[in-house]
Image: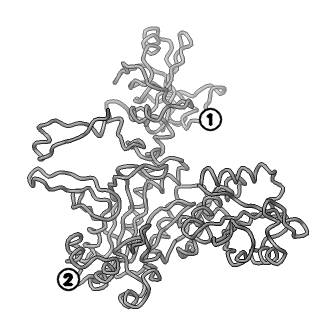
Amino acid sequence: MNEYRTHNCGEIRKENVGETVKIAGWIQTIRDLGGLVFLDVRDQYGITQVVVSNNEELVDFASRIPTESTISVTGKIRLRDEETINKNLATGEVEVFAEKIEILGKRTKNLPFEINSDKEVREDLRLQYRFLDLRNEKLKNNILLRAKIIQYLRNQMITKNFTEVQTPILTSSSPEGARDYLVPSRVHPGKFYALPQAPQQFKQLLMVSGIDKYFQIAPCFRDEDARADRAPGEFYQLDMEMAFATQEDVFSVMEEVIYNTFKEFSNKRVAEYPFPRIAYRDAMLKYGSDKPDLRNPLIIQDVTEIFQNVEFNAFKGKTVRIISVPNCCDNPRSFFDGMTEFAINECGAKGLAWLKVNEDRTLQGPIAKFIDDESREKLLTQTNTNPNDAIFFIAEKPGIVEKLAGQIRIELGNRLNLLEQDVFKFCWIVDFPMYELSDEGKLEFCHNPFSMPQGGLEALKTKEPLDILAYQYDIVCNGIELSSGAVRNHDPEIMIKAFEITGYDKSVIEEKFQALFNAFQYGAPPHAGIAPGVDRMIMLLTDEPVIRNVIAFPMNSKAQDLLMDAPGKVTEQQLREIHIKVDVKTKE
């Protein structure tokens, strides 16, 4: 028998009445009624009420134990009185009548904040005392759910005959993507390892080695700034790769895995697969984003051609997009003014034109006088806009207009409560451009330099670079990108040509990606993969607004571990051993 407990604090039921049991846990609350003390004892599994009475010495002892101390209680199970049954607890029909109480770990310091309280606590304080914060039921349940989700994901991949392989944590620095975390070498002075941003090259090498289907729950490390849906420093992803596979093969596996996972761990409706597939250019036009939230019914439409000859300076020489909002005319003028303020102050727009459509199909609003009857009728007919609808106009140059329209679409959906509730809607964004122009006008890779161009070598040789599409894809859920993936470019000749178009010759590939390029010359299979973010999936499933709430020991938004005081200083001896000198200028 376990020395400290025979039962956990969540499993005792009325069937156990009369049994002598031993439980152990933390004292959540103490209620001293004078000669009668109630203790709520909590562990990972639940809460059991302990009653202490009929023993003056034990009553006095129990009443003086600090809350959040750990104790072991021996006693007999009895039914609670009818009026004291707690229907919110699984153990709420019974209680332990204490015969013996032993303090296992006494709290000797004041609590920095109340555990399991509704009071708001500063996040920096919660992170500094994360071991206490994790005693909070909601946060603890997030971490327990995380463990179940990861196990479920792993079991699904194994069932689909994927082989779990652990790839290295210490590797070489990669020139693409985010900034690396570098690790200096002690035995190779002046040289550095890097923590992997992803196991990308290793999983492709596994395909070359003959592993047919690979996966792992992979830790990834990127020195990038935090966001609500992105943890700084490190994160986990369901990394997978398949040999002799196409884009469709990846979709077939991943749609079922993700659908099953969301169905298993949420009460919300999960949209059926196959998930919609939206070409990148269509996504940017219709939603103003390559991460569209399909719960929002609003669609952006291009009306540039209609307004080519309209005498309105704000539209001249611009790309004009509109968002037609059904049944919006009844909103007060303050709503429209508020949207204009949002566009200017939050989005950086120069303004936001809008119109209401009257019952007789005439227009009402600040720019109505600039639109002639012919243009008005074209606008309403081509955009399927009806009386009592409102139209919002976004006019800017290409590259800017998409972003502005996307932000305004999201804000309209939120302010008008248009988003479909209690549902997860997924989509694939496909057909990403292979290349794009930088702000300086230089041709560069748009998404991933190692993706296979659609049309292969022939497309690279005959098409204009900006017209070439790649076998690249993202999976998006409710406006949050879960993952990017691609069919990989496994052909050295195609790879050389793809880099050549951006101005890099073969020597760059050989230097920066030596292992991968070399391996591909020994007979590589076509292969494809993807890596959905585990943290983001759990964030969605728990309906948490901040990703740190689904990670046991997260860094704060400044990439600091306040609990372990990292990053921290090291000794001169440690620096000498790894051949490092630190030259940090202090702020005056």
- The residue labelled by disc 2 is 522
Residue 358, image x, y percentages: 87, 65
Secondary structure, mark 2, is: helix
In the image, taking residue 270 as reference, residue 354 lies left or right, namely right
Q: Within the image, what quadrant is residue 22 found in?
A: top left
Q: Residue at x 15, y 46 (%)?
A: 580
Residue 435 seen anywhere in this rendered image of the structure = yes
In the orientation shown, which residue stands out farthest toward the right? Answer: 360
Kind of residue sitting beneath label 2: Tyr
Q: Residue at x 58, y 32 (%)?
A: 93
Within-10-Å neighbours for mark 1: few <14, some 14–19, many 20+: few
In the image, taking residue 203 as reference, residue 323 lies left or right, namely right
Q: Earlier in the sequence, mark 1 or mark 2?
A: 1
Q: Within the image, what quadrant is residue 456 found in?
A: bottom left
Residue 273, image x, y percentages: 56, 72
Residue 249 seen anywhere in this rendered image of the structure = no
Residue 181, image x, y percentages: 27, 53
For the rendered model, the colour scheme is: one colour
Q: Quadrant of the N terminus?
A: top left
Q: Are marks 1 and 2 in contact (CB under 8 Å)?
A: no
- The residue labelled by disc 1 is 87
User: Image height check: is 408 above or below 551?
Assistant: below
Residues 487 and 357: in front is 357
Within-10-Å neighbours for mark 2: few <14, some 14–19, many 20+: few
User: Image height check: is 175 above or below 461?
Assistant: above
User: Image height check: is 2 above or below 557?
Assistant: above
Residues 530 and 164: in front is 530
In the image, taking residue 16 as reference, residue 209 lies left or right, namely left
Q: Quadrant of the C terminus?
A: top left
Secondary structure, mark 1, is: loop
